[in-house]
Amino acid sequence: MPPTPPPDARLYRWRFGTVEFDEARHELRVAGLAVDIEHKPLQVLSVLLRHVGEVVTKEELFDQVWTGRITVDHVLATAVGKLRKALDAAGEDRIATVPRVGYRLEGPVERVAQGQRMEGALTFTSGQPVPGREHFLLERPLGRTLGSEVWLARQPRTRDSRVFKFSVGGERLVAIKREATLMRVLRDTLGERDDFVRVLDWNFESEPFFLECEYGGQALPEWAEEHGALQGWNRERKLAFFKRIAAAVDAAHGVGVLHKDIKPANVLVRSRGDDAFQPCLTDFGNSRLLQPERLAELGITGMGMTVTTAHSGDSSGTPLYLAPELIAGQTATVRSDVYALGVLLYQWLAGDLRRPMAPGWERDIEDPLLVEDIRRATDGDPAQRMGRSNAKRRKSNMPQRPPPRSRCSARWSIRERVGPG
């Protein structure tokens, strides 16, 4: 077939059998039930639907779905497998494999135009009132991605600060809906905590959609540079600070919430006065609830995560902090969060939040007990990695271990702060 043309500028709602796919909302429904499925399989479906009855080559799918990203061959097969599993529930697996070439979606399908693609349509400027919250004025952008923006806003009279996460739809809307849901789970089960950024309100009814949050402080990399923490703090102070990050992760794990994107940019830091600082965990838009049935128990509507297809593999997240099993397409677990936490601990102690864990990383960490902790947290085999069950066992054995060096009296043990394994 000729090269696949650029993606259609319009968004559609597609129907075939009991399957409905709404591109504007990035939502797949099977037999009337919304399916919680990862973004890449839905992007594959979108490409196949635009070429019903035609063979779409693997190269074309890689080019359109994984544009500019280095990937391994199995990621496409994994995405198609997840898509087939979702469609199988309705007996509508119409995806045919063309050996050594690609895939074809068999028709017929019904297509209804929804509107124009909105990526890049957010055009906010400093000083502009927040749409729908006009008493707040946008102050400065905190981050931008395709189809979404994050802004700091202030109330001119009271000087109250808010963070608004804006989206024009698609997968970014799904993400902020999921974040709103999971932050309610954390609040309703753990109460108000200073180590999570609180979600205050949201608008999911009209564009631009947004999530309204408290201001949690500076991102860890910028804060650490401004306060000289990476090079100026001693090890004991670094460990005491990191313990608070680990406590937040552990608390989330304790109620069945996996973060799935632990990295320096998702740790915010605010002053507590008297040269004390509080880290807090943010950005649960990519997270997962291990027991979705808890939503009904808590009386929470599962926005962005209504029905799960199964615990399928998940390679979303930031590559430097992705556990090897996630790259291989396996399921995200507590231990994959522990891996990311171990990488972050290494960077924090080594004094460089951009440094990868290259061979010989142990030379950057002076204390052998901390080297052991980091090694156990980042073991390539998840079965050998720390989890709560073996953490408790190892903690109980600590008195028999060699005494720490004199400067390690405040050493933090990652085994004390991981969630259920």
Image (cartoon, rainbow, N blue to C red):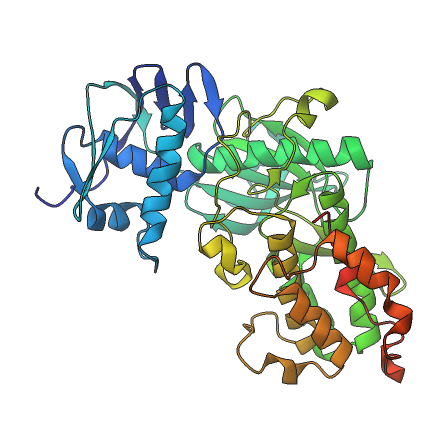
Q: Quadrant of the N terminus?
A: top left
Rendered view: 397 above or below 179: below
- Between 113 and 421, the residue placed more toward the observer is 421
Image position, residue 303 (x, y; %): 57, 26
- Between 292 and 130, the residue placed more toward the observer is 292
Image position, residue 13 (x, y; %): 32, 21
Left or right: residue 402 versus residue 309 is right
Residue pictured at 45% horizontal, 38% vertical: 38
Image position, residue 179 (x, y; %): 61, 37
Left or right: residue 401 versus residue 169 is right
Image position, residue 352 (x, y; %): 62, 75
Residue 152 in view here: yes
- Count of numbered circles on the image: 0
Residue pictured at 72% horizontal, 51% vertical: 249
Rendered view: 11 above or below 399: above
Quadrant location of residue 160? top right
Residue pictured at 61% horizontal, 59% vertical: 340
Residue pictured at 42% horizontal, 33% vertical: 170
Quadrant location of residue 398? bottom right
